[in-house]
Every structure is written in structure tokens, then in C-alpha cells.
Amino acid sequence: MADAAPLPSKRKRELVAEAAPEAPCREETGAGVGNGSAVTARLPFSGFRVQKVLRESARDKIIFLHGKVNESSGDEDGEDAIVILEKTPFQVEQVAQLLTGSPELHLQFSNDIYSTYHLFPPRQLSDIKTTVVFPATEKHLQKYLRQDLRLVRETGEDYKNVTLPHLESQSLSIQWVYNILEKKAEADRIVFENPDPSDGFVLIPDLKWNQQQLDDLYLIAICHRRGIRSLRDLTPEHLPLLRNILRQGQEAILQRYQVRGDHLRVYLHYLPSYYHLHVHFTALGFEAPGSGVERAHLLAEVIENLECDPTHYQQRTLTFALRADNPLLKLLQEAQQRSN
Amino acid sequence: MADAAPLPSKRKRELVAEAAPEAPCREETGAGVGNGSAVTARLPFSGFRVQKVLRESARDKIIFLHGKVNESSGDEDGEDAIVILEKTPFQVEQVAQLLTGSPELHLQFSNDIYSTYHLFPPRQLSDIKTTVVFPATEKHLQKYLRQDLRLVRETGEDYKNVTLPHLESQSLSIQWVYNILEKKAEADRIVFENPDPSDGFVLIPDLKWNQQQLDDLYLIAICHRRGIRSLRDLTPEHLPLLRNILRQGQEAILQRYQVRGDHLRVYLHYLPSYYHLHVHFTALGFEAPGSGVERAHLLAEVIENLECDPTHYQQRTLTFALRADNPLLKLLQEAQQRSN
């Protein structure tokens, strides 16, 4: 899969590098499907010898590990797997229950009205969100490795002459997106669908959201229409699609989660993580990964930009951060030096 | 300075509410100290009836709870306590051990090479950092309370008819800004100055930056010219000033801190915290409070917007978040209902 997708994996690395919580994100992948269910399970490999901590965040309580697995299965080298562990947010009901009982506490210190403890909660409060990428390629390992960032300003010309050709030089598979649109995977997770092939979309919870609390609500609208790579492809002909996603997406979230539109941040990424148009819906109070000004573009403003200037996204300069090792960075810098 | 500067302290309060990790911070208290030891303990009160979730962050896995306690002890009203729970960061040794064993897993779903699980770890991995404030006063409750946010879209008309009159009805002192510009305060902190009264500015480290490390570099450019309240006042006549701030600000930061322009996020806030035009310079790798798409406007894009449309900031709809208790929210909502 990602063997065929170096560029988006670099894209994704930027998202993860910029993002917090630094949750796992998807990109182009190959085939392979299945709707899961909450049953006792085993990891899809045996053993796990830590090779490297790809990234960790004490703030976000998340760790990205590269491990060697299946080493005992004759293959001396074993295989590569990535395991991402993230502690889960609190749910007030569970916490209230916990505190009314007699939780297991170890005193750390007390001073006047302040005291701190180690608390060891019952099972349901110690859930760890675990994401496995297996088998993992070098591209995945690179994707999750933290990298230094650079801000780039991409003119319309830069996009046409540098970014787009670079994109097209990659053979990007987004099979996992098509799996969702065709109900071959995650069909049970779909929150809303407008089936119109031109102006319709599927609304689905983002991988990063465990759906246990609304505090970090995160859904993705994926359009049915294919071939819209990113913001740069948008023209007024896409306004009906964009207006549907904004209005119907907000309505569906109100219906399902009782979260009002003015509690939502609705935006696109540029650069996106994968080149099939999609829109992010996140809780306004949640500092979602990629909601920073250097990557996020509010859908309502995208619509207004297209209404005011049909060629806005072909002509205007767009700013984004790239990881220092992203080949696109060098290509854009060289093009800009030539034009200066 | 804070005595003479209500606004900056207001700023700081907003940022504290906004900022994360939202670690509990202490204030002056009476006597009574003691170093604790890790022994089994009990909470310093009995019972805990949740009154309110003062604040929670799904990103940081932290929750601030206000509870009524000791209600059974004759005092009908009970007493107030604050309990702050925060999940703890991972330690790689523990995690490695966990994965080599057979952890208890529930499959969430799998799609292609990706699978996600609920993992229920052994005791030592489920430690929750618990901070208790008891007895808690109203002051403590207010300190930890986070205000709910609403997203607002302000048209140019809304600004003229609602926001601007509301602003003018407030007598907001920005004496602390003039003190800086006139070298009556913080003169020793000035990093760079262009003294031109029309197109000049002062560059100064933000209060939030301790200047001990570059990771969270944060400076503010404050223009000398008075009367530019915000983005909404900007027209092409301000382009020389804006270009000076962008270019000279980046140069000054390179000179002083050896941080290059493409490592910087340079932006304005709308709404700003105080109504004298200023520009934020933050390290690209640092998710600074207020750098989200719903508040930050990249200076380079502001300049391009003014070049493309001289009336952009008088005409266009701007999106921002307001606290639910901000009177401006109600005024804008009423105006929008009238116009619908």
C-alpha cells in the first residue's frame, strides 16, 4: 500500500507532527476489508520487540511504537508493526461513580488545601485506545516519526508547475476511502449519507475519535464524487456539494449527537492527508489536530471565497507546513528561487 | 504591570482557559504543609456528588470536577471540593512489557492494514494523577471553570451595526499598550522597533513566553499608529505597515533568536484581545493558544486579501468563537435572527 504512496505518507507525517492529540491517521492503502465488532481479540501478530519510540507526547498521553513481531515464526528478521497507544478521555458518569466509591489511592503529598494522589481505577476507566498498523512499511515508520516543519507559501503557479506534477508522479491508492463509499468497510460506522453521486457524501466518525464523549467529537465527510483532489480543484461547480456537506453534515451531527452547528469547526485541510475531497467536523472546544491556521480552511469561508472569485483556489497563494524532509519542500523552494 | 493593565490579565485568563496542558495551578494559601509518601490513603472528605464539570480536555485526558462532599455529616449543604483527574503519560518499558504479554483486547474495527482495539492494561498502567482542592472556595471554582464557546459568523453589516457599537460602548483601557509604545513600561524587553509613527511598530516578547527556550517562542508586534482597532479597520493604506511588520519582524527574530521566517507562524487575531492593531509571531512547531483557524489570520494572507480586494475586511464575513456568556454573542444572534 503505502509503498505506492510516499507523498501522502509525508503529508500525513506533517499532520501528525503538527497535530495534537497526535492520533493515528490514515492515508492511501491497499485492499482488505472488514466491519469490526467489540469482541475479545488478539493482536494480529505474535511478540513485540520495541525497536524505536517513533513519537510520544506526555501532554496527550500517546505513544507511537515501532516493533519487530513474528520473530519466532521462522522469519529471522521478523516483521515490522506499529502500535499506537493513547489513553482515553474521562467520562463524567464513570468518574462520579468512581469518586463516590472508595477508589484505591496512594498519597503523593498534601499541602494546606491541596493534596495529590495516585488513583488506580477499575477496569472500565483504564481503557487504552490501541491502533495497530501491520504489516508496516518504511513509509509508515517515517510517517509517524516526528519531524521538523517549514512553512511554505504555494502560489497558483507553484501548484500547477510543482505540486500537481509531483502529486501525479505518485501512484496514490485510496482504496480505504472507496471501501467506505462502497460499504465494503466500516458500513456500520456511517452516521449519515447523501447518496447523490455528484453532490452527495458519507459522514463517518474519524479514526481519532473513540465516540465515548462529545468533548473531542471528530467526524469526516467524504464526497462520493471522485477526482476532486483538494482545495486547489474547487470551482463554483462544486458549490452544491460543499453546501450539502456543510448544511447536511451539521444537521446529521445535531440529530445523532445533539451538538449544534455553532459548536462545530467545519474545515478542509490543505495540504490534505489523502487526495479525495473530505471535510473535517470537530468540536469547537477541542484543539483538534490540523485545526491550526496553517492547515485548516473553514468550509463556510471556502464557499464564500468561491462565490466571490470563481478562480480563487486556482489563483491564490496558499500557506502550509511541510516536514523538512519532504521532497516537495525542496521542489517548491527551488521553483521560488528561480522565480525571484 | 498587571495592576495598571486589566486587559493583559484578561488576556492571560483567556489563555489559561484556552491553554493546555491545563495543569492545576495553586495560589496563595494558609499554612499547613507536609511531604506525603506513597501509602494507601483516603480522600479528605466523604461522598462526592458532582455539581459541575468545571473543565475537561479530551486532548489532555484531564477533567476538573466540582463536587458537594460531607453532605451526610449534618451540614445539609455539604462542602465544596474540586477533584482534578489526569491520566498519566506512558512509560516505554511498561508498554513494551504489556505488548509482549497477551493484553486484554476488544476489537473496535479493522480495515486493510489498520485495526483498532480497546486495551485493558494491568494496574501499574492505569494510574490516574488526582489532585484535590478541599475545602474549595468560590474563587477556586471560578479559577478552574471553563466557558463554553459558540462559533459566530460576523458579516460586514454585523460588524458595523452590532460589534463596533458594542465595542464603543465599552471603555476599554489600553494604557498598557501606550506605556510600551512610549517606553514607559517594558522598554528593556523591546526586541526591535521601527519608530515610524505611521508604518512603524515595536516587537516585544509576549507575556506568555518565558524566553527560556525557543520551542514556544512567542512575540508580539504592536504598531505605533493609533486607531487601527482590528482586522476590520484594515485597508490598502495599511499595506506598508503590514509589510514592515511581516518582513522586519521576521528579520529581527532571525537576528535575535536565529529562528528563520519559515519556522514562524505570523498572524492576527479576530476578535483580538485588545483593540490596538498587533501581530503574533509564534514558533511553527508550537500550537500557540489562539492559532486555530477560528481565530488566527495569517498576516501574509491578510496582505494578499487587501491587495486583491481593498474592501475585503469591511465586506467579508469573519468567523470567530465567543464565550457563551459574552454579551456580544446575544447581540449578534439577535441581529442575525432579525435579518433572516
Image (tube, coloured by chain):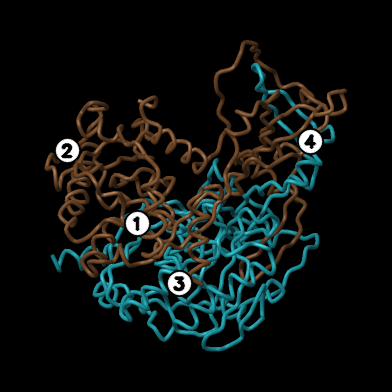
Chain colours: A cyan, B brown
For badge 2, the amino acid type reads Glu
Image location of residue B125, percent across then percent down: 70, 40
| Precedes in sequence: disc 2 or disc 1 | 2
Quadrant of the drawing holding the N terminus of chain B: top left
- The residue where tag 1 is placed is B297
| Same subunit: marks 2 and 4 | no
Which circle marks residue A99 in the picture?
Answer: 4
Examine the rendered structure and indicate whether residue A316 appears above or below residue A283. Answer: below
**Front position among marks 4 and 3:** 4
- The residue where tag 3 is placed is A5
Q: CA distance from mark 2 to mark 3?
A: 47 Å
Mark 4: few/some/many CA within 10 Å (<14, 14-19, 20+): some
Q: Quadrant of residue B108?
A: bottom right
Asked whether residue A165 is in view, the answer is: no
**Front position among marks 2 and 3:** 2
Examine the rendered structure and indicate whether residue A37 appears above or below residue A175. Answer: above
Q: CA distance from mark 1 to mark 4?
A: 43 Å
Secondary structure found at label 4: helix
Image location of residue B84, percent across then percent down: 66, 34
Which circle marks residue B193 in the picture?
Answer: 2
Left or right relative to A23: residue B190:
left
**Front position among marks 1 and 4:** 1
Q: CA distance from mark 2 to mark 4?
A: 55 Å
Q: Which residue is depicted at the point 39% across and 79% down?
A: A234
